[in-house]
Amino acid sequence: MITRIVKLSLDPQKTKDFLVIFDQVKKDIRQFQGCHHLDLLGDIAGSGIVFTYSLWETQENFLDYQNSALFKNTWAKVKPMFIAKAEAWSLEKLRESVVIG
């Protein structure tokens, strides 16, 4: 399982436009082959920084999505809203966490 975290620094005045686009494509992303989970997280200070958090069955599934028309079309719409270069990490779990309580 691959965890993908992407940090997007949006022009604060464009955040609502970004959310509209995200709402339009989130179902299609979640239904993409190998996608197990997708969340959008926002900085509680309202700074325009958002993170996508997604879980993918394999790196290949994620790369198929990244090379898809869905991704390319969406990216073309949202990239002009950024005030800084996107930062992204592909991660794999090294250890299970333990919940106490």
Image (cartoon, grey):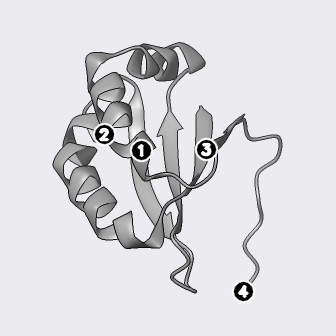
Image quarter in which the C terminus is found: bottom right
Return the mark for residue 101: 4
Q: Nearer the viewer, mark 4 or mark 2?
A: 2
Q: Residue at x 38, y 72 (%)?
A: 13
Is label 1 in a helix, a strand or a loop?
A: helix
The image shows residue 14 at horizontal and vertical percentages of 36, 64
Q: Residue at x 40, y 21 (%)?
A: 65
**5 w.r.t. 44: above or below:** above
Return the mark for residue 80: 1
Q: Tell me how far mark 3 sits from mark 1, CA to CA.
A: 11 Å
Amino acid under disc 1: Pro
> Is there CB contact under 8 Å for labels 4 and 2?
no
Q: Tell me how far mark 4 sits from mark 3, CA to CA.
A: 37 Å
**78 w.r.t. 16: above or below:** above
> Residue at label 2?
77
> Residue at label 3?
86
- Extreme residue in the right direction: 94
The image shows residue 60 at horizontal and vertical percentages of 53, 13
Describe residue 10's horizontal placement relative to residue 84 as left or right. left
Q: Which sits in the foreground, 80 or 99?
A: 80
User: Is disc 3 surrounded by few (<14), some (14 to 19) or many (20+) residues within 10 Å?
Assistant: few
**46 w.r.t. 56: above or below:** below
Describe residue 80's horizontal placement relative to residue 70 as left or right. right
Q: Residue at x 52, y 51 (%)?
A: 53
Q: Nearer the viewer, mark 3 or mark 1?
A: 1
